[in-house]
Image (tube, helix red, strand yellow):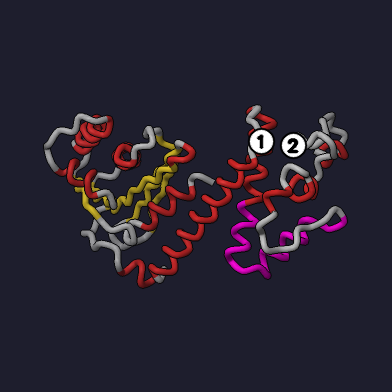
Amino acid sequence: MTALANRRVNVDIICPLCRFEPETIMHLFANCSRVQPLWNDVNCQVPNEHDDFAAWFSMWLTLGENGLVMKCIAICWSIWKGRNDLVWNSKTWDPASIMFEVANMVLDWQGDADLEANNNVHVSSLNSLPVVDPGIMSIYVDATVYNADAEAYYGVFVMDSSREFVAAKNGLIRCLNNAHLAEALAVKKALSWVKELGFAKILIFSDCKNVCRLLNGSSQDLSYAGCVIRECRALKRHFELVSIQYVSRSVNRFAHALARATRS
């Protein structure tokens, strides 16, 4: 806010968290009494009011070990989100919720890093993908549910028969914290989207065995997910060739990473 005030924009420059000091970058992310507790268990020297925050942050990004870097980024991002929720949505600043979000964010990023390392990426990863006939598009689909935040996201990753990237899509879905429903909705999103793109021959790959089984069968599911499954079956009629196949999470890593990345 002080930067806007310096440009002669009529804004309130007082920190919205503590309501005592001007809201500078240094104050908001490090010196404010409401954010200082977030840095208590971080094994690094937090900058003081005489330091340059950008220089301090850049130093840890380049010199810090991965776990520390992840935590510093997660804290700053969570502070910024919490501050904006307070200013724009009148949401109460809750340090416990902020710390919980930081912990979850670090776990998510560590999980993605471990997945990438375990898959040995690039050439070896591409060799593990299913082989498809020419003219058929491979559609990788996944959903991620964050029960603590009541949020879910989907990712769709499209490749051609030569394993070349064609398109990708992700977004928010409403699934009542139901993972089964989220996976079904992700497949529906994928079918609707690739129909709009004009693809005639497709293979849908999902790492949810239950959804694959239901989509390939005729049994009835009376849950909310069952309604979505019926809509997916109706969408299948618009394609010249369509098949739903199960793949492991490691093979479906592109859509999985895309779904998780949607949150941030």
What's the amino acid at mark 2? Leu
Q: Which mark is residue 56?
A: none
Characterize the local packing of mark 2: few (<14), some (14-19) or many (20 or more) Cα atoms within 10 angstroms: some
**Chain part drawn in magenta:** 50-74
Q: Quadrant of residue 176?
A: top left
Question: Mark 1 sits on what residue?
Answer: 93
* 250 within the magenta span: no
Q: Quadrant of residue 91?
A: top right
- Residue contact between numbered discs 2 and 1, judged by CB atoms under 8 Å: yes
Q: Is residue 98 above or below residue 103?
A: above
Q: Looking at the image, can residue 122 be seen?
A: no
Question: Mark 2 sits on what residue?
Answer: 17
* 55 within the magenta span: yes
Secondary structure type for disc 2: loop
Give the dominant element type of the magenta stretch: helix, strand or loop.
helix
Q: Is residue 99 above or below residue 218?
A: below
Between residues 164 and 60, which one lies in front from this camera angle? 60
